[in-house]
């Protein structure tokens, strides 16, 4: 599965973004992403886990793997650009 295909799926980037600071459990993730059905959340989590971007910790919460943390670092320039762009509006 190509990275852009996976990351382009609805909610994938949001899930990764929500995990940037700390592990998050299933219910908390669903609450943070209001409007996402449990079925879609479960599917996206499984896809991201299969891609080794996320994993579960000892408390069964979702967290970023080293690969996922590298992905967050790659978002840095895009985030900076998006903030500048948003200021224009």
Image (cartoon, rainbow, N blue to C red):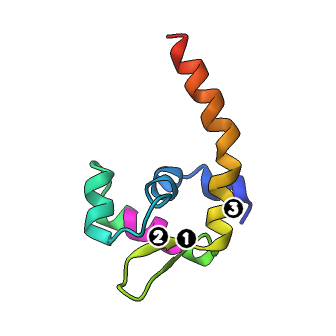
Disc 2 and disc 1 in contact, CB within 8 angstroms = yes
Q: Position of residue 23 (x, y in %)?
A: 41, 70
Q: Position of residue 9 (x, y in %)?
A: 55, 52
Query: Crowding at label 3, few (<14), some or many (≥20) Cα neighbours within 10 Å?
Result: few
Q: Position of residue 1 (x, y in %)?
A: 71, 66
Q: Which residues are magenta?
A: 41-47
Residue at (30, 53) in percent of width and height: 32
Residue behind mark 1: 47
Mark 2 to mark 1: distance in Å? Answer: 5 Å
Residue with the most extreme top position: 88
Say what secondary structure mark 2 lies in. helix
Disc 3 and disc 1 in contact, CB within 8 angstroms = no
The mark lying in front, picked from 3 and 2, is: 3
Q: Is residue 17 above or below residue 29?
A: above
Say what secondary structure mark 1 lies in. helix
Mark 3 / mark 1, whichever is N-terminal: 1
Q: Is residue 20 left or right of residue 26?
A: right
In the picture, the disc for residue 70 is: 3
Residue at (65, 46) in percent of width and height: 75
Residue behind mark 2: 45
Mark 3 to mark 2: distance in Å? Answer: 18 Å
Residue at (25, 56) in percent of width and height: 31
> Is residue 43 found inside the magenta-colored segment of the image?
yes
Query: Crowding at label 1, few (<14), some or many (≥20) Cα neighbours within 10 Å?
Result: some
Mark 3 / mark 2, whichever is N-terminal: 2
Q: Is residue 61 left or right of residue 86?
A: left
Say what secondary structure mark 3 lies in. helix
Query: Crowding at label 2, few (<14), some or many (≥20) Cα neighbours within 10 Å?
Result: many
23 or 36: nearer the eye? Answer: 23
> Is residue 76 found inside the magenta-colored segment of the image?
no
């Amino acid at each position: 599965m190509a990275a852009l295909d996976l990351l382009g799926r609805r909610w994938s980037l949001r899930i990764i973004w929500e995990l940037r600071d700390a592990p998050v459990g299933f219910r908390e993730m669903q609450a943070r992403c209001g409007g996402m059905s449990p079925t879609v959340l479960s599917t996206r989590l499984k896809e991201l886990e299969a891609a080794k971007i996320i994993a579960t910790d000892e408390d069964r919460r979702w967290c970023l793997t080293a690969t996922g943390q590298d992905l967050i670092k790659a978002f840095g320039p895009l985030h900076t650009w998006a903030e500048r762009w948003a200021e224009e509006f």
